[in-house]
Image (cartoon, rainbow, N blue to C red):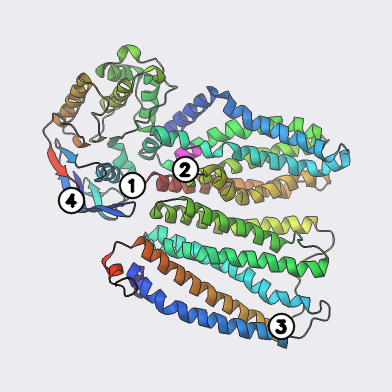
């Protein structure tokens, strides 16, 4: 369903990769490996449409994503290094805001359920500035739970998480794949989910 | 469609709420506007005839400068914490979301100027009719300043020296608003009526409201690459 | 399409290399002819004497500053629409020359104004618009210099150039309107002396000279930019200027 064709990427005058092609079908996960600076984050951002490739294209459901970016974005969720959370808002408020931006507003009950799933049910009304780094990452993960997006693009989802939280991520991704979802992930650590490996920057 | 409006409303609420927790951000440009307007009579002299002559121009230059004061920060916080990326990935067109942010900015920086204008007008002895015209043209013109400034803020996002660069890019584009805004009040003072000026300002506002969100969203995507 | 082949940097490099020397020669020749026509052949104006001759530089410089800005906007639009890298390079290559003509126009305007109306600067509609155009040029140059990534610099600069070109008529209209409202005496540099044919010829020749100069400079600069950006490419290593 997601098909990347002959993608080439250049950053800062350097060619990071060229002629990259792969496909992800329902229920599949692709894990991208490579040294720092090999272009993993750039690849993810190109797939999402945040960055432009030098050559090649990304197709979703057979159509070039540049033709109808709106409907592609409706089915996509991207979790990057910076999760896009505001410190002065509470966890629940952040999730509520994010869901409105994503175009699928959530009820307070759905928000509470999602936060409970990531272990933050009791802290949902505290301002985010009181949370630890790991807790903030969990709030970002709650978004994955709450939102019915088909394609998950995750950039280092295990970073800054303790062991229990890392297991949570694996469970979430596994459940997502079970439900015919797709995932494109970069991670230095093993994800704990069956996935195809993609290496960048030989 | 309503999902898009909901998203814009949520963004507007979030920005306004965030500003409510940082009242200094709103108060500083307003204070600057009032102080600059008060400095000129002190520098030039209390002769009312002169003050009436220069008043409209000074009010407008003050409005321009205070509008530009915090402009470079419009998108900076969102870029830093990753919210901007998420906005760019929203199914709602980025242009609409930019428009929502500009509206929030105007409510916090432009609208207060309109409300404070009568006080400034009194300093320059503008009279009742001209004060009304001043408030009207500020109401029409300050949104244009916010709209154009937003494009500049998007273009200079994350660059070294963004504040100065923004001023250089945006101040020349402010000049039509300045000319017609100040001209309107001067025309009213001169007894000629400000209809033509107000019409031009209305046209500028329509054009800017249509074009700037689109240009700003293109510039944001360039900055996010 | 024939022109599309020049979107490839190495072809543009070669084409520009053939053109710019010719353009400079043409510029020198035309300048000499134009100055001769303007400063020797054209008669002294019966009102303004010899000082008016500065218009043979002032008017062509003004025209070129506006033509170059429109050319920049055209290349900017090409770059955004077709995503060709050379478009951004051409836009950046044109900007300094355009700014130079703007500056020249302002200086010669001042030099003309002083003997005529006793002031170094008059807020004439066209001079004021020229000043604002200079700020637009400087803004473009400052922005493209401040951005490290060349692609982002090209694209951000393209947005600035396009926003600017839309605004130039608006700004000109506002300033002209502002000027007519406030001018007491009709001080206007746009009131040119009644033109003898040879004066028009002189201005035309000078305009062409400036155009040739701008073309030469733009192509010369774009070659430098291409070398900088494509320094990794194989064809660059094989150039006789570079290869040992």
Q: CA distance from mark 3 to mark 2?
A: 50 Å
Farthest-out residue, top: A122
Q: CA distance from mark 4 to mark 3?
A: 67 Å
Q: Which residue is mark 1?
A: A51
Check residue B157 in the rendering and tell me which mark sits there, or answer none: 2
Q: To which quarter of the image does residue B60 belong?
A: top right
Image quadrant where one finds the N terminus of chain C: bottom left
Q: Nearer the viewer, mark 4 or mark 3?
A: 3
Image quadrant where one finds the C terminus of chain C: bottom left
Q: Is residue B122 above or below residue C77?
A: above
Q: Nearer the viewer, mark 1 or mark 2?
A: 2
Q: CA distance from mark 2 to mark 4?
A: 33 Å
Residues in magenta?
B95-100
Reading the chain from its start, which is encountered first: label 1 or label 4? 4
What x and y, as percent, mark residue A122?
32, 11
Is residue C210 found inside the magenta-colored segment of the image? no
């Amino acid at each position: 369903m997601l098909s990347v064709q002959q993608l080439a990427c250049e950053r800062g005058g350097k060619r990071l990769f060229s002629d990259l092609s792969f496909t992800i079908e329902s229920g599949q996960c692709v894990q991208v490996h490579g040294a720092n600076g090999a272009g993993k984050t750039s690849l993810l951002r190109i797939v999402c449409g945040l960055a432009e490739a030098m050559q090649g294209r990304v197709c979703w459901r057979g159509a070039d994503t540049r033709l109808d970016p709106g409907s592609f974005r409706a089915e996509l969720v991207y979790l990057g290094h910076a999760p896009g959370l505001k410190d002065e808002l509470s966890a629940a408020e952040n999730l509520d805001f994010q869901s409105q931006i994503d175009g699928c507003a959530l009820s307070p009950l759905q928000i509470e359920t999602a936060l409970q799933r990531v272990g933050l049910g009791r802290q949902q009304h505290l301002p985010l500035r009181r949370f630890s780094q790991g807790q903030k990452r969990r709030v970002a993960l709650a978004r994955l739970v709450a939102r019915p997006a088909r394609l998950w693009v995750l950039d280092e989802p295990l970073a800054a998480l303790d062991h229990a939280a890392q297991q949570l991520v694996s469970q979430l991704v596994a459940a997502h794949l079970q439900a015919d979802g797709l995932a494109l992930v970069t991670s230095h650590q093993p994800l704990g989910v069956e996935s195809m490996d993609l290496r960048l920057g030989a | 469609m309503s999902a898009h409006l909901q998203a814009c409303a949520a963004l507007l609420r979030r920005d306004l709420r965030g500003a409510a927790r940082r009242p200094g951000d709103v108060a500083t440009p307003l204070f600057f506007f009032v102080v600059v307007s008060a400095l000129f009579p002190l520098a030039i002299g209390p002769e009312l005839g002169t003050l009436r002559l220069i008043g409209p121009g000074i009010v407008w230059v003050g409005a321009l400068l205070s509008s530009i004061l915090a402009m470079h920060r419009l998108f900076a916080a969102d870029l830093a914490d990753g919210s901007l990326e998420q906005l760019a990935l929203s199914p709602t067109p980025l242009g609409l979301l930019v428009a929502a942010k500009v509206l929030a900015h105007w409510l916090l920086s432009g609208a207060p100027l309109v409300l404070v204008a009568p006080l400034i007008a009194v300093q320059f002895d503008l009279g009742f009719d001209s004060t009304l015209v001043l408030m009207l043209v500020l109401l029409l013109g300050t949104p244009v300043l916010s709209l154009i400034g937003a494009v500049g803020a998007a273009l200079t996002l994350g660059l070294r020296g963004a504040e100065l660069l923004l001023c250089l890019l945006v101040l020349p584009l402010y000049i039509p608003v300045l000319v017609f805004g100040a001209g309107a009040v001067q025309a009213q003072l001169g007894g000629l009526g400000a209809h033509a000026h107000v019409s031009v300002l209305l046209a500028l506002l329509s054009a800017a409201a249509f074009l700037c969100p689109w240009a700003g969203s293109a510039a944001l995507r360039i900055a996010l690459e | 399409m024939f022109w599309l082949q020049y979107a490839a940097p190495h072809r543009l490099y070669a084409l520009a290399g053939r053109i710019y020397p010719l353009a400079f020669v043409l510029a020198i020749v035309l300048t000499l002819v134009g100055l001769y026509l303007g400063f020797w052949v054209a008669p002294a104006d019966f009102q303004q004497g010899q000082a008016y001759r500065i218009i043979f530089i002032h008017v062509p410089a003004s025209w070129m500053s506006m033509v170059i800005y429109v050319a920049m906007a055209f290349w900017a639009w090409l770059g955004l629409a077709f995503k060709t890298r050379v478009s951004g390079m051409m836009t950046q290559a044109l900007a300094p020359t355009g700014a130079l003509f703007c500056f020249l126009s302002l200086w010669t305007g001042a030099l003309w104004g002083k003997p005529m109306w006793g002031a170094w600067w008059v807020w004439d509609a066209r001079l004021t618009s020229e000043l604002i155009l200079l700020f637009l040029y400087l803004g473009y140059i400052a922005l493209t210099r401040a951005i490290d990534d060349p692609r982002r610099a090209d694209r951000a600069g393209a947005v600035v150039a396009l926003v600017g070109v839309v605004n130039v008529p608006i700004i000109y209209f506002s300033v002209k309107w502002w000027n007519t409202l406030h001018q007491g005496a009709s001080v206007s540099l746009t009131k040119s002396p009644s033109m003898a044919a040879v004066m028009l010829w002189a201005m035309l020749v000078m305009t062409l000279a400036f155009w040739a100069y701008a073309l030469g400079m733009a192509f010369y600069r774009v070659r430098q930019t291409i070398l900088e950006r494509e320094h990794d490419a194989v064809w660059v290593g094989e150039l006789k200027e570079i290869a040992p």
